[in-house]
Structures are given as C-alpha cells and as structure tokens.
Image: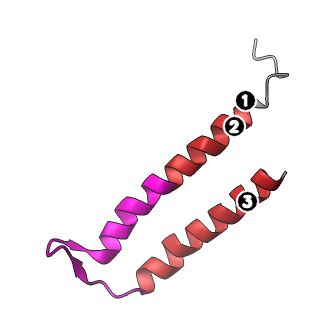
Amino acid sequence: MLRKKLFILFNIIYFFIDWIIIPIIPNQIVFNIIPLQLLLMLVLPIFAAVIWGLYYNNFFKTQSHVNYD
C-alpha cells in the first residue's frame, strides 16, 4: 500500500513539474546547443518511464492469482 501511495505522489510531483514548473523557468541555452526547457522535457520522461516500468513490473508480479485465459 505504501508503494501505491508513493507512486501516486511521484506522479503528482512529476506532472506538476512537467506542466507548471518547466514552462515558468527561464529558457537558457545549455551546452550552447539546446534550450533548458527542451532538455528537461526530453530527459525527465526517461526517468519517469523507468519508475513507471519498475512499479508496473512489481504490480503485475502480485497478480499471480488472476487467470488470463
């Protein structure tokens, strides 16, 4: 149950950062090539996908009692 609450909290924080914080931050150029907002929008989903994958892998391991046939 704690993992479920942590996952929900992670999603709330992630989408708050993604939709509210990133558009507000100054759009500086990073590495003289890419805007900061674009860099964050490209990198943050990778970390979120890893966490989502770990959570759902763990979730489906607990569903052994379900008959999919």
**Colour pattern:** secondary structure
Q: Is residue 41 magenta?
A: yes
Residue 25 at what x, y percent from top left? 40, 86
**Span colored in magenta:** 25-47
Residue 4 at what x, y percent from top left? 77, 52
Name the residue tied to disc 2: 58
- The residue lying at 62 percent from left, 70 percent from top is 13
Q: Is residue 23 magenta?
A: no
Please tell me the numbered disc located at residue 61. Answer: 1
Quadrant (top left/top right/bottom left/bottom right) for the C terminus = top right
| Residue 36 position (above or below residue 61) | below
- Is mark 1 in CB contact (under 8 Å) with mark 2? yes
Circle 1 sits in a helix, a strand or a loop, which is it?
A: helix
- Crowdedness of circle 3 by 10 Å Cα count: few (<14), some, many (20+)? few
Kind of residue at disc 3: Leu
Give the Cα separation between the discs numbered 2 and 3. Answer: 14 Å
Kind of residue at disc 1: Lys
Circle 2 sits in a helix, a strand or a loop, which is it?
A: helix
Residue 5 at what x, y percent from top left? 78, 59
Is 10 left, or right, of 50 in this rendering? right
- Is mark 2 in CB contact (under 8 Å) with mark 3? no
- The residue lying at 65 percent from left, 40 percent from top is 56
Name the residue tied to disc 3: 6
Give the residue at the far left of this rendering.
Answer: 32
Give the Cα separation between the discs numbered 3 and 1. Answer: 18 Å
Is 58 left, or right, of 67 in this rendering? left
Kind of residue at disc 2: Asn
| Residue 1 position (above or below residue 38) | above
Give the Cα separation between the discs numbered 1 and 2. Answer: 5 Å
- The residue lying at 81 percent from left, 55 percent from top is 2
- The residue lying at 59 percent from left, 48 percent from top is 52
Q: Quadrant of residue 24?
A: bottom left
